Image (cartoon, rainbow, N blue to C red):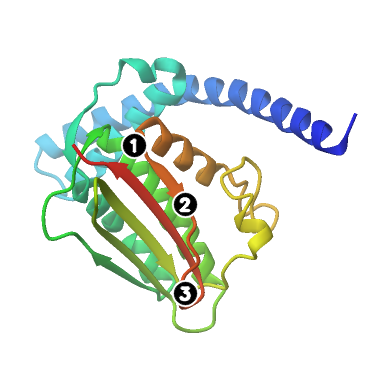
Amino acid sequence: MSDANEEQLDETARLAELGLLTASLMHELRQPVFAIKALAQILRSEGADPRLAALLEHVDHVEDLIAHYGGFGASLAEATFDLRVPVREAVDMMGHRARALHAELRHEPADAPLRVNGRSSAALQVVVNLLHNALDAVEEGDAGRIVVVRSFVDGDNAVIEVEDTGPGLPLEVRQKLGRPFVTTKPPGRGTGLGLYIAQKLVREHGGDLSFPTPERGGTLVRVALPRT
């Protein structure tokens, strides 16, 4: 058996094991997430900290993820939505980490609505995963820690780009990105699954995730989704 076939079999086995672990984890997470949500709703009704509303939005997102990865994804409703909305939510969610890293997180939204069909929560997950990777990249730098998130129209597509000023990616690594367990992060820092999941979600929505070569170094990730 060739090395390539052995690598493919090993990857398949690891994904199968990961699937079983994920299903078990999703099952166990449902109850504590439900309890957190119920308590937060009670506190909000009693006039507690207004930030509980933002907390409940995050809990709703977690519930959606649990439903999707717990095997109930087919039952989740799809709709037409403005892609700028989940992008803004992702930027807001990751803002605290950018501030902790003393990094500049720039948001350059499209001037007009970017209507696409699918799940807004899936788009949110994609952008959050891309921002996690971008902030990981600039964390290693000494200066000029900048992450830019932009959205715009390109023909029949709505496009999201996430660009960072990190060390960039060698060509041989860029060609393998999107495969499970391919990562440039040290052990214990990443598995490559975040990008794998992001690419899978983009393809499920009829889109494409690519890695153009940025003009100024660093890393550039582009997500193109068909506009409705």
What residue does disc 1 label? 122
Q: Earlier in the sequence, mark 2 or mark 3?
A: 3
What residue does disc 3 label? 165
Q: Quadrant of the C terminus?
A: top left
* Crowdedness near tag 3: few (<14), some (14–19) or many (≥20) residues, C-alpha within 10 Å: many
* Crowdedness near tag 1: few (<14), some (14–19) or many (≥20) residues, C-alpha within 10 Å: many
Determine whether the residue tagged by mark 2 lies in a helix, strand or loop: strand
Asked which quadrant contains residue 67, the reply is top left
Residue 210: mark: 2
Q: Name above or below for residue 81 compared with residue 71.
A: below
Q: Can you tell which of label 1 and label 2 is closer to the viewer?
A: 2
Figure label count: 3
For marks 2 and 3, give the CA distance. Answer: 18 Å
For marks 1 and 3, give the CA distance. Answer: 26 Å
Q: Amino acid at mark 1?
A: Ala
Q: Residue at x 24, y 27 (%)?
A: 38
Contact (CB < 8 A) between labels 1 and 2? Answer: no
- 133 left or right of 186 in image: left
Q: Position of residue 209 (x, y in %)?
A: 44, 47
